[in-house]
Image (cartoon, rainbow, N blue to C red):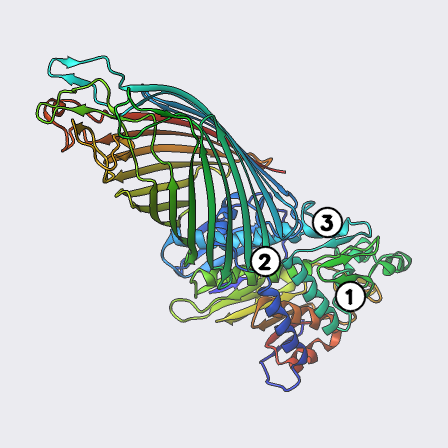
């Protein structure tokens, strides 16, 4: 065997080498770097479903899910979801969605149970109801340039009392070799409320019923940025400003009217509520996905503020840990805390007619804690099967400041417990 | 610390797993199977969990490229092209870029590098024996070889029926560079990627020492190093394989075939290793040198590429 060893010599005629170098540089940069999250997922899943580039081998992605949400002694919701996404070509994709849900049970009307010092009376504290809602929607995604995408969407939902239609558009643009993505979007929706509406802030037995249909419309403006940070860390920031106007009062909610000193209810006819017909809100959302070992930690925080005076914070953690190549477990913890709306009143003193008032517990100061776990299974044939269970507990002020007299002895915010079961299936075709 | 270069061990990989160990020198070694052989990533960081993630990034890239461009993967792009039966196929960005690159290499090598030459393997089996193919069988394949017969108009490729492409001559080096890109984007600046003997260093070790790569002795693959290459930054690739040849009447027939004749390049070295800015550059320069036959040495000298040739 003859060995030859030559050191690099600088020569003028490095023709092939420099041409090769130029060609390989454009080869290497032809494909933008995958997002850290994608890469990580790829690592966990093998090569099954990486990249939707080119003529995709599996153009359909279908997700189907079923959820059951049950509040203890109150409402329960059954929901079916269906999503289908079809990659039409390299530059176009169509997504379709359909949801069906059914809500039934009893929800607090807002009136207090305690009528007099002698104890509770028979006034309805809970309103029983049942409603079903069906919703359909579609998105069309198309690329405007290799770095920019446009998504146009349309939605419609319908229940007995409410029909809602919306349209939206969003542009996403990648920068910095796809390490940065900016999104800007706008959407508009209009709700037609078709139910019997009572005169606001009027004793419910004398309130006249209007059968005219009311309207509500809403504009959402969204601005977001997604940034890949070093070592598999992804940061997402999102800001949404919403402007709603129209009928936002809940005709099923009532407010107890009590004696200004004793707190005894003076009439069996509580007042109907009234909310402002304008609501501006701002929500800031930050999410960090961070790869930890073989797992991924998803941490998010959301701040919400609106012109009704509600301020809310949500902190959410999920951690996805692979158990085997096919199985993962994902514990979840969520804490939501909100302050009361300016016009929230647990009760009104007789004769008091504020500009706006509502005793809906959802506008009160409250905190919701959720804890859950999700199991995901990815069979060799592709797709994913998930099962999730979550327990939720909601607490508010049992004895709010504005409670009067005897009402202070009542538990005006009974603890709410709910349990959620969800199963889902994702398949690529 | 010579890192043994493993040359094209004939492995078929069923499992996609990365095994991690800490080497005695203190760096973390992640090993996995991809692209037809053993692959390794050497990282000089103390945090084993971070290393696991980073090596996962590199392995993910290797597996992704393997699954897209291996001609054996029936759902991959190459399989789709090879089974289009004369119909045009519209390709994605990445596949198009690879074909553009193959086209450039075909031009730069005056037609010697040809991704359609793979079907000549039907006639040739390089098993170290003296069984040369029937010249008629080789000639019969030649009408189905030749990049100039292919209609490539980005992003559309139309392959005449009976022809096939094989990106095996680019894929491994491409995977090394793309994995390096992933790690670089993740902030890594002292790692060595070695996919089956084709390597790239993202920077010297934490103690500023270069990574040292051992070149296998073609006569004793896997058992002896004939030379070690220090690699601070950039690519190093080796073309040639000791065990893939035929020998008849004292004449050696290496596995590098001339796409124009269908017969092995005359007088080609046993092994050519080249250092270059990227692993793709190194790999192509080594391949071009091989295709130059006995002029390999002159070619690499003229190109000013640091190299090591075993005749």
Determine the image quadrant of residue A199.
top left
Q: Which residue is label 2 attached to?
A: A144
Q: Which residue is label 1 attached to?
A: B252
Q: Which residue is label 3 attached to?
A: B80
Q: Residue at x 13, y 20 (%)?
A: A264
Say whether residue B204 is visible: yes
Q: Earlier in the sequence, mark 1 or mark 3?
A: 3
Task: Tally the marks.
Answer: 3
The label on residue B20 is none
The answer for how far apart the CA atoms under marks 3 and 2 are is 27 Å
Left or right of B146, for residue A252: left
Name the chain letter of the residue that bears numbered label 2. Answer: A
Q: How far across and how far down the image is residue A240, in percent?
A: 39, 49
Q: Residues within 10 Å of mark 1 (few under 14, many from 20)?
A: some
Query: Do the residues bearing badges 2 and 1 touch, measured as CB atoms within 8 Å?
Result: no
Determine the image quadrant of residue A306.
top left
Residue A190 position (above or below residue B282): above
């Amino acid at each position: 065997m003859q060995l030859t060893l030559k050191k690099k010599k600088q020569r003028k005629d490095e023709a092939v080498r420099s041409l090769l170098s130029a060609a390989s540089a454009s080869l290497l940069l032809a494909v933008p770097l995958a997002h850290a999250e994608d890469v990580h997922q790829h690592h966990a899943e093998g090569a099954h479903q990486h990249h939707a580039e080119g003529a995709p081998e599996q153009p359909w992605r279908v997700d189907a899910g079923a959820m059951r949400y049950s509040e203890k002694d109150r409402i329960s919701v059954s929901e079916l979801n269906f999503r289908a996404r079809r990659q039409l070509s390299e530059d176009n994709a169509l997504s379709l969605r359909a949801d069906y849900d059914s809500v039934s049970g009893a929800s607090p009307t807002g009136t207090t149970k305690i009528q007099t010092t002698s104890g509770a009376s028979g006034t309805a504290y809970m309103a029983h109801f049942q409603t079903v809602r069906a919703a359909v929607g579609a998105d069309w995604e198309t690329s405007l340039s290799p770095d920019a995408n446009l998504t146009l969407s349309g939605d419609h939902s319908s229940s007995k009392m409410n029909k809602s239609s919306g349209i939206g558009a969003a542009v996403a643009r990648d920068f910095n070799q796809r390490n940065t993505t900016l999104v800007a979007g706008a959407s508009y929706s209009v709700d037609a409320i078709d139910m019997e509406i009572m005169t606001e802030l009027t004793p419910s037995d004398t309130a006249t019923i209007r059968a005219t249909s009311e309207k509500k419309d809403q504009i959402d403006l969204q601005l977001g940025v997604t940034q890949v940070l070093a070592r598999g860390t992804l940061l997402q920031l999102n800001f949404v400003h919403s402007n709603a106007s129209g009928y936002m009062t809940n005709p099923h909610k009532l407010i107890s009217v009590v004696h200004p000193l004793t707190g005894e209810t003076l009439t069996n006819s509580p007042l109907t509520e009234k909310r402002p017909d304008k609501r501006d809100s701002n929500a800031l959302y930050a999410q960090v996905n961070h790869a930890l070992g073989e797992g991924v930690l998803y941490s998010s925080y959301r701040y919400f503020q609106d012109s009704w005076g509600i301020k809310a914070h949500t902190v959410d953690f999920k951690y996805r840990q692979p158990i085997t190549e096919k199985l993962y477990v994902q514990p979840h913890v969520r804490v939501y805390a909100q302050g009361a709306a300016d016009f929230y009143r647990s009760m009104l003193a007789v004769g008091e007619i504020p500009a706006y008032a509502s005793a809906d517990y959802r506008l009160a100061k409250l905190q919701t804690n959720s804890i859950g776990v999700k199991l995901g299974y990815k069979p060799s044939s592709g797709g994913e099967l998930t099962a999730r269970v979550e327990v939720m507990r909601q607490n508010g002020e049992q004895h709010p400041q504005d409670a009067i007299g005897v009402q202070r002895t009542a538990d005006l915010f009974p603890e709410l417990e709910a349990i959620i079961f969800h199963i889902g299936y994702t398949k690529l075709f | 610390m010579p890192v043994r270069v493993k040359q094209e061990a004939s492995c078929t990989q069923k499992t996609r797993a990365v095994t991690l160990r800490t080497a005695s020198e203190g760096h973390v070694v992640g090993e996995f199977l991809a692209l037809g052989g053993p692959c390794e990533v050497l990282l000089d960081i103390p945090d084993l969990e971070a290393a696991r993630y980073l090596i996962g990034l590199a392995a993910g890239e290797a597996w992704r490229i393997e699954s897209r461009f291996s001609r054996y993967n029936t759902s991959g792009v190459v399989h789709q092209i090879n089974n289009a039966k004369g119909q045009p196929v519209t390709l994605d960005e990445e596949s198009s870029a690879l074909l553009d690159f193959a086209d450039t290499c075909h031009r730069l090598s005056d037609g010697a590098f040809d991704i359609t030459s793979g079907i000549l393997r039907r006639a040739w089996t390089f098993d170290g024996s003296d069984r040369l193919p029937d010249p008629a069988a080789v000639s019969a394949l030649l009408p189905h070889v030749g990049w100039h017969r292919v209609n490539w108009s980005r992003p559309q490729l139309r392959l005449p029926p009976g022809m096939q492409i094989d990106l095996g001559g680019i894929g491994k080096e491409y995977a090394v560079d793309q994995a390096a890109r992933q790690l670089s984007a993740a902030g890594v600046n002292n790692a060595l990627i070695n996919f089956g003997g084709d390597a790239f260093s993202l920077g010297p070790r934490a103690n500023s020492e270069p990574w040292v790569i051992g070149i296998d002795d073609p006569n004793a693959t896997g058992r002896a190093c004939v030379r070690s290459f220090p690699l601070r930054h950039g690519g190093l690739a080796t073309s040639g394989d000791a065990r893939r040849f035929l020998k008849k009447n004292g004449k050696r027939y290496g596995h590098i075939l001339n796409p124009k004749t269908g017969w092995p390049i005359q007088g080609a070295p046993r092994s050519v290793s080249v250092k270059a800015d990227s692993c793709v550059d190194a790999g192509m320069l080594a391949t071009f040198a091989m295709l130059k036959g006995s002029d390999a040495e002159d070619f690499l000298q003229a190109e000013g590429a640091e190299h090591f040739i075993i005749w």
